[in-house]
Amino acid sequence: MQRQSHGRAGFSLVELLVASAIFLVLLGGIAALYSNALRTVLFGYQAQGAFEKVRASLSVLERDLAGAFSARPYGDRYNFFGTGQGFTFVGRLDAVGHVGMDLVRQIRTIYDHYDYPTQIIVAAVRHPVHVLEAALAGADVCTMFFDVMKQLYDHPLTDVGIEMFLNDWRKVPQDAEP
């Protein structure tokens, strides 16, 4: 089909409508991008404000905790001022080539010998063996990550034993009257 020209140059109505539709689609995409960018910037400002509040809170907490502890020059052990708890960070000591549990045993021996009413808190526990050794050394409290606590009861042989028990239980007739 040939286009008839009546002596005027320009676009037909269909061409203008198609161009307008394309323009509106592009404009909608740009508006959506702008909206998402604006939302991201606003979220960033909110997150920055929250981080600043957290940083200020942690700074106050750090200052308060630094004042609450007395560091000992002979080891990685801290006591609260005026309380009967002593912290020993065994994982940190092990990480620098010491045997942290030896320090716990020494502290327990000294505290028992002089009858100090101090609880020994073993901290920075890295694995279940630390927990066992802390209990054997006479520690009163042991702090650990949840993963370490999970390892204390989550053992492959336990899973096998439970599975064997459940299989045996399924073999027991369930309709028997007691």
Image: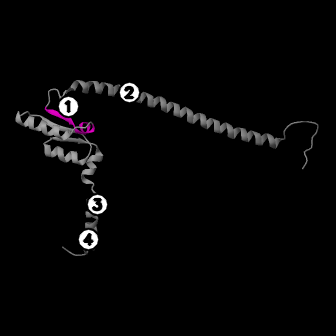
Instruction: Note whether 82 is above or below 109 in the view shown.
Output: above
> Foreground mark, 4 or 1?
1
| Upstream in sequence: badge 4 or badge 2 | 2
C-alpha separation, residue under disc 4 versus residue under disc 1: 53 Å
Q: Residues within 10 Å of mark 2 (few under 14, many from 20)?
A: few
The residue pinned by badge 2 equals 53
Q: Which residues are magenta?
A: 84-95
Which label sits on residue 134? none
Decide: marks 1, 2 in contact (CB < 8 A)? no
- The residue identified by callout 4 is 168
- Cα distance in 3D space between marks 3 and 1: 40 Å
Quarter of the rendering containing residue 35: top right
For label 3, the SS is helix
- Please tell me which residue is depicted at 20% across the width and 31% down the height of the picture: 75
Crowd rating for badge 1 (residues with CA inside 10 Å; few <14, some 14–19, many 20+): few
- Point out residue 173 in the picture as x, y percentages from the top left corner: 25, 75
Q: Earlier in the sequence, mark 2 or mark 3?
A: 2
Q: Which mark is residue 159?
A: 3
Residue 12 location (% of width, % of height): 84, 41
In which quadrant of the rendered image does the C terminus lie?
Answer: bottom left
Q: Amino acid at mark 4?
A: Asp
Q: Nearer the viewer, mark 3 or mark 1?
A: 1
| Residue shown at 16% from the left, 33% from the top | 86
